[in-house]
Amino acid sequence: MSQRWVTLTTADGPMECYEASPGSDSGGDPRGAVIVIQEAFGVNDHIQDVTRRAAAAGYLAVAPAIFHRAGGGTAPYDDFSQVMPLFEGLSDDGLLVDVDATIAHLGALGFGPERIGIVGFCMGGRVTFLVAARRALGAAVGFYGGGIASSGFLPFPALIDESATLQTPWLGLFGDLDQSIPVEGVEELRVALAGAPVATEIVRYADAGPRTTRPRQGTPGPGRSTGSPGTSPEGTFPESLPAARYGSAPRPRDWARGAAGWGTVGGAVRRRASR
């Protein structure tokens, strides 16, 4: 595996990206490319680790540092007062500028949009929905993405009204114990996605809270891909990219491959609008 920081040019100035590649010892070319969108804390050690795990699974993975307008950097998980200043100058249009620059970078490396997936966590989960609504990629997966069904504490509008015009297959994973994302809102989103022209899926985990994909927070557990909540031991959320047990719930990596038509899963997972 190889890893590096690269600097991309955007309309809003230079943007650093953390990039991890399977490397020459992987036995072949990358299966595809994955854009990893950070939480509200920046491209920190955890996000870099997720990016490396995507590379270990055979993908070229890139995590754009979208806080470049405010000077960049990260914030600790336990001090939210350091988080909000990082959002200075950031808007949905700016997020799309950054994602577009990342897509262009991957395109220059030989990956067309259909070979690019996007995964995001917390605010990054919302970004995956934004991108799915306004860009056509292979697949998108959002973990505990708040601010989709209704506006959250960050300065961005709700996106649920764009459900019927999604351009990219989208999988959303939510924890019922996440107080910032009410279950009612998740179910409203499920209903709205019934009219989407692409494959969509929502999975709820009954005993999971937010941000529990971070390291050392237990072992991922089984869940169900229907409208009924799944279960996840010790309150943990399932991992995003490495192998894990999901019961009958779609593993995000496999779901994305199938929805994107990358040939490793027999067809896309169809959207489910009812419990």
Image (tube, grey):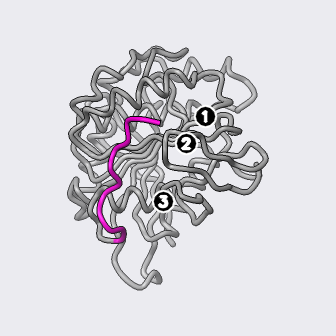
What is the secondary structure assignment of the residue under circle 1? loop
Tell me the mark number nearer the camera, choosing from 3 and 2.
Answer: 2
Secondary structure character of the magenta stretch overall:
loop
User: In the picture provided, is 246 more to the left or to the right than 256?
Assistant: right
Q: Up-down: is 2 above or below 87? A: below
Label 2 and label 1: CA atoms lie apart by: 7 Å
Q: Which label's residue is closer to the chain start, 3 or 1? A: 3
* Residue 271 sits inside the magenta stretch: yes
For image coordinates 68% across by 30% down, the residue present is: 177
Q: Earlier in the sequence, mark 3 or mark 2?
A: 3
Q: Mark 1 highlights which residue? A: 74
Q: Amino acid at mark 3?
A: Arg
Question: Residue 212 in the image: x percent, y percent?
Answer: 68, 42
Residue beneath disc 2: 43
State the residue at coordinates (37%, 36%). Answer: 273
Question: Which residue is identified by label 3?
Answer: 4
Disc 3 is placed on an element classified as strand
Residue 240 left/right relative to 28:
right
Asked if marks 3 and 2 touch (Cβ < 8 Å), the reply is no
235 drawn magenta: no
Part of the protein shown in magenta: 264-275
Badge 1 amino acid:
Thr
